[in-house]
Amino acid sequence: LFRAHAELTRTPAHLPAMPSKEGVASKTHRGSSFTKRNEERIFTLDGYLVSYCKIKADGSKGTKTGQFDLRQCKSMEKPAPGSADEGADIKLTMPSKKIAIAFKEDKDEWLKLMCSAVKADSVITSDELKACYNAEVFNTFIDQHAEQKGKTKTVYEKATTSAPPAAAAAPPPLSYTEPAAAPPAAPTPAPESAPVPEP
């Protein structure tokens, strides 16, 4: 069977490796639920475009059966246990279809690439998948595939990858010193009485 593998093509030194991957995964078939019917396909991720093909008897690629553009994805979620798509690693809602996918190998790498191709705060609905998002990979998609032809003209703005500035240190608390007590005042001498005149 075709073995999943990452295809990280080297690019100029100032850019990370190009987002590209290929491997076997199971997907829902023609709108059915994952638990009802799923079929294995060879998936190829090249930038924002993900295509899938049938698998020949020798494990090589057969007929291409579909493709989608991750920039068109309206939502990404992790199917809940007991749901119709239980067993899939990710479910994508596209403009004209929904597709649930379970990766045979390198699941974490696949999820990182797919989840990092979209704006996590507006597309990804599951906390588990939001944890797969990587801002540096998101920016790599933009650097190398912003003008990639597909079914959309969506162009994302780059994400901030630097840590936020540290908060200013709080000033030290004001200290209070009890003022020293004033020395007791000297007693005021009693006024001398006027002398009594002699008779």
Image (spheres, rainbow, N blue to C red):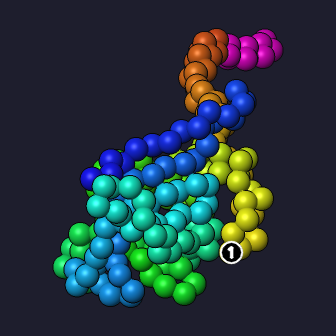
Question: Is residue 3 toward the left or the right of residue 69 in the image?
Answer: left
- The image position of residue 85, as x and y in percent, is 28, 78
- The image position of residue 77, as x and y in percent, is 41, 71
Question: Is residue 55 toward the left or the right of residue 136 in the image?
Answer: left
Question: Is residue 178 toward the left or the right of residue 111 in the image?
Answer: right
- The image position of residue 41, as x and y in percent, is 37, 66
Of residues 118 and 187, the one drawn nearer to the viewer in this rendering: 118
Q: Quick check: 105 above or below 91?
A: above
Q: In the displayed image of the protein, which residue is found farthest to the left?
A: 82
Start and end of the magenta stretch?
187-199
Q: Quadrant of the C terminus?
A: top right
Q: Quick check: 188 above or below 13?
A: above
Question: Is residue 147 toward the left or the right of residue 125 in the image?
Answer: right
Residue 108 seen from this side? no
Q: Main secondary structure of the magenta part?
A: loop
Q: Mark 1 belongs to which amino acid?
A: Lys
Where on the picture, by quarter, is residue 163? top right
- The residue at 54%/87% (across/down) is 96
- The residue at 27%/53% (across/down) is 1
Q: Which residue is mark 1?
A: 151
Residue 79 magenta-highlighted = no
- The residue at 30%/84% (across/down) is 33
Where on the picture, by quarter, is residue 129? bottom left
Q: Quick check: 44 above or below 122?
A: above
